[in-house]
Amino acid sequence: MKNLILVLSLIVFVSQLTVAQSHQGTAMFGIQSNPISKNKAKKLGLDQPYGAYITNIIGNTTAEKEGFQRFDYITKVDEYELKDDFHFSNIMKQYKVGDQATIYYTRNGKELKNRVTFGNSQDAQHRSKDSNEDPFLGIEANHSKNPSGVNGVSVDIVKNSTAEDLGLQDDDIITKIDDIPMIDWHDISAAIDNREVGELIKVAYYRDSQENTATLPIKSLATTKNNPQHNKNKTDNTPIALALNETPEVEKVISDMDIDMEDMPKEDAQKMEEELGIKMPTVQNLSIEQLNIFPNPTQGLFNLKFDLPEEGATAIRIFDNRGVLVFRNDLGNFSGNYSGSIDLGNQPAGTYYVMIKQKNLSVSKKVIVSRN
């Protein structure tokens, strides 16, 4: 009888151990972030480049519970310092669910640290909402060069939008939103996305050698696009299907180009599907690491790099903002590091959309190419 009890006790112990181990997956902190370049770090007054600049806080995660905010800038986790080749995602692989770590970060120029306990990805709560009900400022990139010494994003204004109500005009340069410096479109997206419709938004903008500030409640995409004045300004002559060799020729000058990349905005995806018949997914569910696109001036090309930890049928597509397919590459059954050259030298500066698919998963990005 004692032997039977001992055997049963061992079975219970092993079962409990197995269950405990099954929950010890890779730790989750609960942020979406972008690494930043030396140039952006300098503009923001940060001493250390390549840290993780938080663009979104995921609900019911460690980051939310510990009070981290968008635009916090993480520089180190315990002894692991963020570097050009060692991003925040690399650091998180060193930890398991339930592990503790000290997060070092900067907020509004002040250096802070916080001791946290990492959670489980199963606890995360991702927001789900009809894109029409998303907050919509109503600005578009116009790729104009900023005056010397002025940091910000030059924009054109959408009719009947919050931006128009705020008094913004075409060619204004947005310098701050809610007193946070706006350096590029990553910052603009982070400042607008995931806020509530009707919430006050404070916009500082540069015009005629002076900075102006205005504050109003932000309207939704639906409110803006359903206005008759907005619809009247939409054109009906957008080209939909052009061959790859029918793109306009421009002087090939890569060395003076800048590239900004952000997640695919829902309003852009909706416009592409409704007006161009191209479905660009906005759910970023493909596990992809170190995705980057940057100029290669020595060869007159752009480099696209990423790492796919899983294996499967993989394809790359790049469209311009008219729906023209300007690049495609079918990689077959692929996993690991990808590094490829893309010749966009004969394409004009403007907006492009990158889609990477693996089996039924995908990630899509908006890429803004501008000439200095």
Image (cartoon, grey):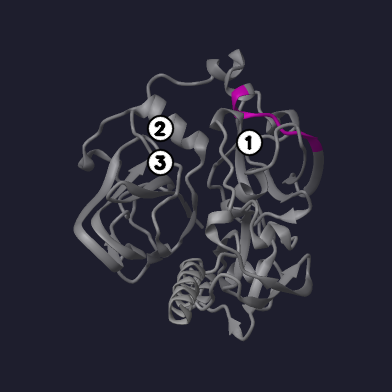
Q: Which residues are magenta?
A: 215-222
Of discs 2 and 1, which sits in the foreground?
2
Residue with the mark numbered 1: 170
Does the CB distance between marks 3 and 1 fall below 8 Å? no
Q: Point out the tag, 3 or 1, that comes first from the N-terminus.
A: 1
Q: Is residue 261 above or below residue 224?
A: below
Rounded to the nearest whole Å, what is the CA distance between mark 2 and mark 3?
11 Å
312 sits to left or right of 308: left
Q: Residue at x 64, y 82 (%)?
A: 78
Q: Residue at x 69, y 71 (%)?
A: 116
| Residue 317 lies in the magenta stretch | no
Residue with the mark numbered 3: 281
User: Element type at marker 1?
Assistant: loop
Rounded to the nearest whole Å, what is the CA distance between mark 2 and mark 1?
23 Å
Residue with the mark numbered 2: 272
Of discs 2 and 3, which sits in the foreground?
3
Q: Point out the tag, 2 or 1, that comes first from the N-terminus.
A: 1
156 sits to left or right of 361: right
Q: The residue under label 3 is which amino acid type?
A: Pro
Query: Where is residue 273 shown, x and y percent of the image?
Result: 39, 30
